[in-house]
Image (cartoon, helix red, strand yellow):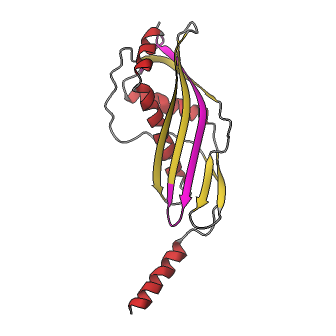
């Protein structure tokens, strides 16, 4: 009896395993974290606007691969990352006490990398990394600080889930923005470049 049950379970698990990996296009949508944040205390917590440029050399978002078979497929973006990054960063900063005012410094962000990895078996494990360079600039054009930051995030769930991708990429952006907020150089530059 045990042998029949064991064989049945193996057959059931094998039947549930993913047998093909198809290319995937991910539309970016910022998903704010439900976890309440403790606002960062900044000396000059305001910016006038955020401008983003996409300077990625690799335009493919990532790769999907099967854990036990030689199956792989590319993941591409189905939307422009610049508005997503700007809106997400603005939302995250606002939740952390950074207001938008005409006299605030300007934040210029260069997106240098955005990569994902999806590892598939019965379910999928997801990883994402984002690389940014943030410059704080005054209205006259003076750059008060320039700083590279990175963010990472992971997720787990159904294979090829757009929701999992969107949530994970948003969390990686939040992680990078948090690193920027935590930088004393960023706080000082916001004051130097104000007005």
Image coordinates of residue 75 in percent, x first then y, are 63, 50
Q: Where 3 falls versus 127 (above or below)?
A: below
Q: Main secondary structure of the magenta part?
A: strand
Magenta-span inclusion, residue 123: yes
Q: Where 33 falls versus 53 (above or below)?
A: below
Q: Is residue 5 left or right of 29 when viewed as pictured?
A: left
Magenta-span inclusion, residue 73: no
Nearer to the camera, 87 or 194: 194
Task: Note whether residue 23 is visible.
Answer: no
Nearer to the camera, 41 or 151: 151
Q: Which residue is rendered at x = 42% and y = 11% of the image?
A: 191
Image coordinates of residue 103 in percent, x first then y, are 47, 10
Q: Which residue is rendered at x = 50% and y = 34% of the image?
A: 150
Q: Which residue is rendered at x = 42% and y = 87% of the image?
A: 5
Q: Which residues are magenta?
A: 99-125
Q: Which residue is rendered at x = 44% and y = 19% of the image?
A: 186
Image coordinates of residue 139 in percent, x first then y, are 54, 9
- The N terminus lies in quadrant: bottom left
Image coordinates of residue 192 in percent, x first then y, are 45, 9
Task: Note whether residue 6 is visible.
Answer: yes
- Residue 53 is drawn in which quadrant? top right
Q: Is residue 183 left or right of 61 when viewed as pictured?
A: left
């Amino acid at each position: 009896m045990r042998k029949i049950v064991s064989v049945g379970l193996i057959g059931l698990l094998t039947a549930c395993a993913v047998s093909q990996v198809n290319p995937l296009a991910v539309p970016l949508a910022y998903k704010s974290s439900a976890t309440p944040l403790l606002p960062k205390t900044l000396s000059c917590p305001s910016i006038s606007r955020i401008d983003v440029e996409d300077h990625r050399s690799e335009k493919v978002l990532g790769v999907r691969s099967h854990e036990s078979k030689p199956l792989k497929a590319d993941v591409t973006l189905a939307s422009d990352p610049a508005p997503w990054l700007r809106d997400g960063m603005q939302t995250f900063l606002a939740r952390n006490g950074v207001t938008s005012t005409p006299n605030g410094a300007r934040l210029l962000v260069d997106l240098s990398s955005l990569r994902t990895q999806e590892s598939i078996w019965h379910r999928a494990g997801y990883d994402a990394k984002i690389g940014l360079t943030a410059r704080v600039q005054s209205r006259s054009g003076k750059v008060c600080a320039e700083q590279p930051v990175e963010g990472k995030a992971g997720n787990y769930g159904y294979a090829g889930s757009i929701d999992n991708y969107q949530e994970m990429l948003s969390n990686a952006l939040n992680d990078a923005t948090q690193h920027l907020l935590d930088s004393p150089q960023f706080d000082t530059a916001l004051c130097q470049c104000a007005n």
